[in-house]
Amino acid sequence: MSDSANPIELSFELAASRCADLTPSVYQRLFSMHPEAQAMFRSQGSGLVQGSMLALTVEAILDFAGPRSGHFRLIACEVASHEAYGTPRELFIAFFMVIRDTLRDLLGDEWSPDIARAWDTLLAEIDAFAVAPT
Ligand code: HEM
């Protein structure tokens, strides 16, 4: 594991050393907090869609919190396309909180004040960005 200066990146690295695949924990949490989200996914093949949606979201988060090379723009594009899937904006944004909470539970004692602060800031920035992309 590298020493990451970026607390968001670090939180994903620490989680990866504890859990090979975040997908089941993230979607279990999402569906228990927001049961209506489950029905938005297709009944067949939704596992692949969910895995790929999470992977792309994590890529977008790391880019948003880091180099801003382009992947972060997915966030603004997907707000619009998710309206077609019946996903309201508030629920769309809630997915980022679900990811944060999943990491926090996995990290336990290693969820530092630095990491917590970085996630608070990131969630507020993503919320603003999803309304008015810059
Ligand atoms: C709780 C919030 C969300 C719900 C309920 C949701 C729901 C969905 C659904 C139903 C689909 C699949 C449509 C299909 O069957 O083809 C989908 C696909 C996708 N979602 Fe989400 N979404 C959420 C949040 C997000 C967020 C925050 C992002 C990224 C910023 C995102 C990115 C994507 C992408 C990239 C796909 C296409 C995946 C692929 O087929 O490769 N979603 N989402």
Image (cartoon, grey):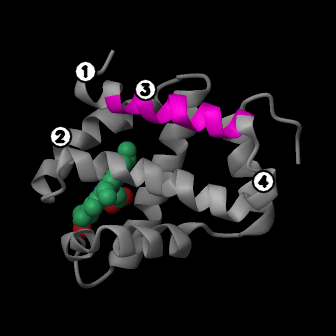
> Residue, x 36% and y 37% (percent of image)?
74
Ligand 1 within 8 Å of disc 4? The answer is no
> What's drawn in magenta, residue-wise?
114-127
Q: Which residue corresponds to mark 1?
A: 132
Mark 1 or mark 2: name the one nearer the start of the chain. 2
Q: CA distance from mark 1 to mark 2?
A: 12 Å
Compared to residue 9, the image places residue 131 above or below, namely above
Q: Which residue corresponds to mark 4?
A: 14
Relative horizontal placement of residue 85, taking residue 107 as reference (left or right): left
- Which disc is residue 57 wearing? none
Q: CA distance from mark 2 to mark 4?
A: 32 Å
Q: Which residue corresponds to mark 2?
A: 80
Q: Secondary structure at mark 3?
A: helix
Mark 2 or mark 3: name the one nearer the start of the chain. 2
Q: Which residue corresponds to mark 3?
A: 125
Mark 4 or mark 3: name the one nearer the start of the chain. 4
Residue 96 appears at what percent x and percent y? 44, 48
Counting labels gives 4
Mark 4 or mark 1: name the one nearer the start of the chain. 4
Mark 3 or mark 1: name the one nearer the start of the chain. 3
Q: Secondary structure at mark 4?
A: helix
Q: CA distance from mark 3 to mark 1?
A: 10 Å
- Quarter residue 22 falls in: bottom right
Relative horizontal placement of residue 92, taking residue 24 as reference (left or right): left
Packing grade of label 2 (10 A; few <14, some 14-19, many >=20) is some
Q: Residue 125: within the magenta?
A: yes
Dominant secondary-structure state across the stretch colored magenta:
helix
> Residue, x 27% and y 43% (percent of image)?
78
